[in-house]
Amino acid sequence: MDNENLAELLFPDIKNKPCYYEEKYPERELPEKAEVTRIGPSPTGFIHLGNLYSAMAGERLAHRSGGVFYLRIEDTDNKRKVDGAVESVISSLDYFDIRFDEGAEVERQAGSVSYGPFYQRQRAEIYQTYVKELVRKGLAYPCFCSEEDLNSIRKVQTDEKLDIGYYGKWAKCRCLSCEEAAEKIKSGAPYSMRLRSAGQPGNTIKFRDEIMGEISLPENMMDVVILKSDGIPTYHFAHAVDDHLMRTTTVIRGCEWLPSVPIHVELFNVLGFRRPKYAHTAQLMKMEDNKKRKLSKRKDPELSLGYYRELGYHAEAVRVYLMTILNSNFEEWYQKNPGVPIEEFNFSLKKMGVSGILFDLQKLDDISADIISSKEREEVYEYFLNWMKTYKPESVPVYFADPEKMGRIMDLCMGVGQKRRRKDFINCIQMFGFLSYFFDEIFEPEYDFEKYESMTEIIREFKDTYDYNDDSSAWFSKLKLIADKFGYASDMKAYKQNPEQYKGNVSHVAEIIRVAVTGRKNTPDLWTIMQILGTESCSKRLDMAIDHLAG
Ligand code: GLU
């Protein structure tokens, strides 16, 4: 019994040799320096902001260089699989406009060769082919240790404060002869496959991370599992085989994988593969009580991508914001190049943060407000309508009953046709609340009257003299008359000189009317709002306010 026989006994159904796959998935025909990158989500149903951050870096790197960005579903861990997760990943990538050229579920292929399948569970035969070859060379072996065996090893190692893992004298199955192993296999004992590591304690490996720079880490000396007992690989092994055969040039992934690089380096070496470049992205953090802390799945809803869709953030705002935190020089470029597609920005891994990237929702809101205010009214109208159809369908007949009215509201709130655009809108949920006072059916005034004198009389007088046909200057002249009548200054200069002689000034009168009509203190131009609402609605609201003040 030798390694060759053992390999045959372990994998009788594997007929191909690695060279078969090497030929089937040749080097990609791409321009020099073109990068091949990928996103490899696990279908756990939770694709988060960190994934999107890495995906954008990968997408930009590939597409800036004339390369390929692809999607691989890393479903080796069946226990964590969630139904519908793949669809949700794809729809998130679509929503945020992260275009991938090849990958799961999608009839896209970048060149003449298909590098799929892109689901790892469908690639079992490929991985087994490579493991079989490692067994032939004596570089991998079957391990028959049970969960209990491994737990008791771990316990002793913990008690003795030793490195935890399967190595050296602890790696019992490493020393089994081919005969002994064969006997156990024939008796039907379950086994996993392990790498026969050549690593030595005390050795270090050095490599260059494209983001983190020069890194040195202890060499791997663990006989890590490469194939689980069901014949499905571990992440480490699948990463090596897939990124090799799919011809990835740069692996961009979260920094939680950085400590595993020594394992990956050894795997690439024993498999005889050229190693891709690595780029580990730093952790996303937030400020809390003046301290930075990691974004957490449990505490921070903004980590989930669903959050941005539910709140109706414009995908472009999220993209622009992510670019801002991806590359330190992006913001300046963006400001200097208004209207230029962000794809033209010269994205670089070298400009990525190496630790604790601060994610700031306030900043995202500012960017959102800028972006929405720069859009055409029709686009914002459609964007708001589409969001409402999905997330507040019962409100569509209220907000969109009269498309012309909604169009006028949008023009007003966006400042269309004004010297300066307004920035009232941040995202759909905020627009939903912000615009609610325009609709009598759902109007819920938040009366926040200051303590001015004669408010009821002022409102009554305003109601009696209001004429829908007044233009805005006639309307304002009437406000001034009311101011004079009730002891408020209609002339701001006079007021500033002797404020104590007045109960207030005309802006206070306007504020009283604003709060009475809209139930809000801050609104766009009040005259226009009243034009949109119409006389009947305004009169009712003025009466309501009078009733409210009467207590
Ligand atoms: N499936 C891995 C994860 O979800 C991907 C890591 C990688 O991109 O290699 O964390």
Image (cartoon, rainbow, N blue to C red):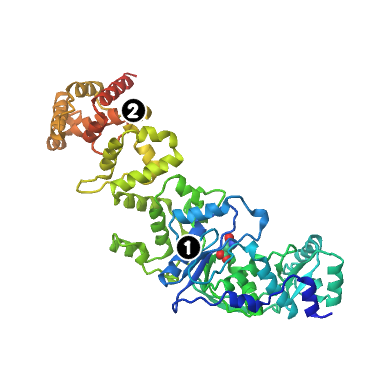
> In the image, residue 248 lies at what x, y percent?
53, 72
Relative placement, left or right, of 5 versus 431 is right
Q: Secondary structure at mark 2?
A: helix
Q: Nearer the viewer, residue 151 or 123?
A: 123
Mark 1 and mark 2 in contact? Answer it, CB < 8 Å. Answer: no
- Label of residue 440 in the image: 2
Q: Nearer the viewer, residue 362 or 173?
A: 173
Q: Callout 1: 10 Å neighbours few (<14), some, many (20+)? A: many
> In the image, residue 394 lies at what x, y percent?
43, 33
Q: CA distance from mark 1 to mark 2?
A: 46 Å
> In the image, residue 205 lies at what x, y percent?
61, 78
Q: Disc 2 marks which amino acid?
A: Asp
Which quadrant holds the N terminus? bottom right
Relative placement, left or right, of 306 versus 231 is left
> In the image, residue 379 lies at what x, y percent?
32, 48
Query: Based on the displayed image, in which of its 4 quarters is residue 416 positioned?
Result: top left
Q: Residue at x 48, y 60 (%)?
A: 53
Is the residue 511 above or below the residue 8 in the image? Answer: above
Q: Disc 1 marks which amino acid?
A: Phe
The residue at which mark 1 appears reads as: 100
